[in-house]
Image (spheres, helix red, strand yellow):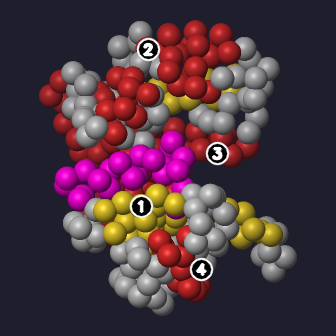
Amino acid sequence: MSDKLIDGKYYSSQIKNEIKEETQKLKTEKGIIPGLAFILAGENPASKVYVKSKGKACEELGFNSITRTLPENTSEQEILDLISEFNCNPVIHGILVQLPLPKHIDEGKVIEHIDYKKDVDGFHPQNAGRLSIGQNCFIPCTPYGIIELLKRKGIDTKGKNAVVIGRSNIVGKPIANLMLRKEINSTVTICHSSTRNIKEFTRNADILIAAIGKPEFVTGDMIKEGCAIIDVGINRVEDSSNQKGYRLTGDVNFGECYEKALFITPVPGGVGPMTIAMLMKNTLDSASGKIYQ
């Protein structure tokens, strides 16, 4: 890969090797094996793929994992009862409820029912609040992965203008909070669907983080020379020339932005692989008592 590309596959592999070593050490010295429980409700094909890949990562790293699959018509109470079971299980250190849930289930209620000390997704209000004030907590996996990419690629963040496009609770808000932390020390602007003249903000970005969910939204005329671009998006775009009938693209027009950017993540192969790696890191930290004793 070009030095300009931020290779998420390479860095995620690096992190997983570190986790594997630490897991073996934890098992040898304390007899603890990280345990991760997955709850999958419904028939969402993408969710099934995600849970399967996360389970495979657990196996590779020496974790214990359990997946409970529930039908589309499962009741909210059944999910809450299952979470309660995992909350009380001492060999389960992380609980992940795969989103989205069936429409009749209140996602907020489900997330709040997870013991925040086992909330390795980092979505519980307790973890979100602690993140916002800079306290120790579980960090949502995609933003956590972005920070690791910036650090491991050696991208200078101190005093830099970081522009985040998107304000979701999963990526936009937490990455903005992380970029404000003293060890990162960026000046942060959040843009979203109601931002006027968005180019005025993005052209001033030293670091641009695109997480808006719109294919190739960021074009070459929206960035300045020498910026670092983190593309969180992964979108299917119809493409009759492709055997599958579609191609994957990010929220950034890679072709237009590549030449102007100093660094840029590819899609796929950029942020995506880091998300699972950081989920594993959160689970390991939960098992070892690094986040909450």
- Return the disc, 1 or 4, that comes first in the chain's sequence: 1
Instruction: Give the residues in magenta.
Output: 165-185
The numbered mark at residue 189 is 1
- Return the disc, 2 or 4, that comes first in the chain's sequence: 2
The numbered mark at residue 87 is 2
Q: Mark 1: which amino acid?
A: Thr
Q: Where is residue 103 in the image (x, y as percent from the top left)?
A: 75, 29
The image quadrant where one finds the N terminus is bottom left
**Residue 2 visible in image:** no
- Return the disc, 1 or 3, that comes first in the chain's sequence: 3
* Circles 2, 3 touching at the beta carbon (< 8 Å): no
Judge left or right: residue 269 versus residue 26. Answer: right
* Circles 1, 3 touching at the beta carbon (< 8 Å): no
Secondary element at image label 4: loop
- The residue furthest front is 196
CA separation, marks 1 and 2? 37 Å
Q: Mark 2: which amino acid?
A: Asn
- Return the disc, 2 or 3, that comes first in the chain's sequence: 3
- Return the disc, 1 or 2, that comes first in the chain's sequence: 2
Q: Which residue matches tag 4? A: 219
Nearer to the camera, 87 or 218: 218
Q: Where is residue 30 in the image (x, y as percent from the top left)?
A: 18, 24
Q: Mark 4: which amino acid?
A: Thr
Is residue 173 part of the magenta span, yes or no? yes
CA separation, marks 1 and 4? 18 Å
Question: Can you say whether 213 is above or below 255 in the image?
Answer: above
CA separation, marks 2 and 4? 45 Å
Between label 1 and label 4, give the one nearer the viewer.
Answer: 1
Determine the residue positioned at 41% across, 46% down: 174
Judge left or right: residue 134 versus residue 110. Answer: left
